[in-house]
Structure formats: C-alpha cells, structure tokens
Amino acid sequence: MPFRRIALVAFLSSVFVVAPAHAQRASDPQLYLTIFRNPSSGVELRFGQIGVHAGFYPTILKADGEKKGRNTNFLRFGATMYSAATGTAAYLSPSVVVSLDKRFRSGFLTDAGVRGRIAGPVAGRIGVGMLNTFDGEVRINPTVGLDVRLGRAR
C-alpha cells in the first residue's frame, strides 16, 4: 500500500508541475467544459498542447461473477497531452480515479484517441481507456465525449 500512495503522490505532482511549466511557453490558458467520459464531466484547463482536468467519470463495469454490468462512478483527476494545440489532434490522457462505489477501488485510468472540432467552440473526442484499480482489476472501455470552450479563442 505505501508504494501506491507514493505512486499517486508522484503522479499528481507531475501533473501539477508540468502544466504550469508548459504554460510559460504556450498561449494564454483556456477553460473547457467537458461532457461525458472523455476525459470526464467536468472542466479542463489547457495550456497550449497540455491540459489539466478534473470531473465525474461514470462507466458501466461488471464485477467478478456479475452477468450484467452496473453503473460505476469515479472522480477523475489528470492531464492530457495533445499532438497539436488546436484543430484535430491525437491525445494521451493519464489520470487518477477515485472510486465513489464500494464495488471497485480507486486506481489509474489512461486513455488515448483523437479530438476534432465539430462546430464553433465544440469539439468531440473518441478513444479507448484502460482502467487499472488498486485491487488489480483491469478494464478496457471506449471513451467518448464533447468539450466546449468557455470564453473566446486566443
């Protein structure tokens, strides 16, 4: 258990150190409202090609022995690295998830995919995510979502 805590602290430290350091080289930060599971229903603050996000992450998971999956809820905190600051771009998004349910423990979630502009300030995302909980569960899920830029483009 101490290793997991150390890993969690190291990960969170890297998320909150990398984004502000990158911000010194990027344009002004922009705030986005994120909807559904990619990265979560919450907010993302972007500094050029780097984003920091936090929000609610719902998914359907089957616990051992269950025939049908049930809604499972997490809080998700992490970073996203984009191949380009604007337009269509590939992304990689490592994060920590905190379980809100007793069926699954907290863990890490990493997803990768592509983001593309739909219209105006709205962009869509589609990818695949791998959830690793601290009790050894591994799940692969599709991740889809929308993000809406708040404020003017810079």
Image (cartoon, grey):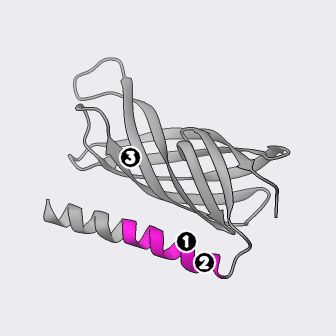
Q: Which residue is mark 1?
A: 19
Of the pair 25 and 85, the residue shown nearer to us: 25
Q: Residues within 10 Å of mark 1 (few under 14, many from 20)?
A: many
Q: What residue is at 64 percent from the left and 81 percent from the top?
A: 24
Q: Which residue is mark 2?
A: 22
Q: What residue is at 22 percent from the left and 23 percent from the top?
A: 65
Q: Quadrant of the N terminus?
A: bottom left
Q: What residue is at 66 percent from the left and 68 percent from the top?
A: 49
In the rendered image of this protein, does residue 72 appear above or below residue 92? above
Element under label 3?
Answer: strand
Residue 23 colored in magenta in the image: yes
Q: Which residues are magenta?
A: 12-24
Element under label 2?
Answer: helix
Classify residue 102 by image quadrant: top left
In the rendered image of this protein, does residue 154 appear above or below residue 42? below
The picture places residue 112, in percent across and down from the top left corner, at: 56, 54
Q: What residue is at 61 percent from the left and 59 percent from the top?
A: 45
User: Of label 1 and label 3, which has the lower sequence position?
Assistant: 1
The picture places residue 94, in percent across and down from the top left corner, at: 46, 59
Q: Amino acid at mark 2?
A: His
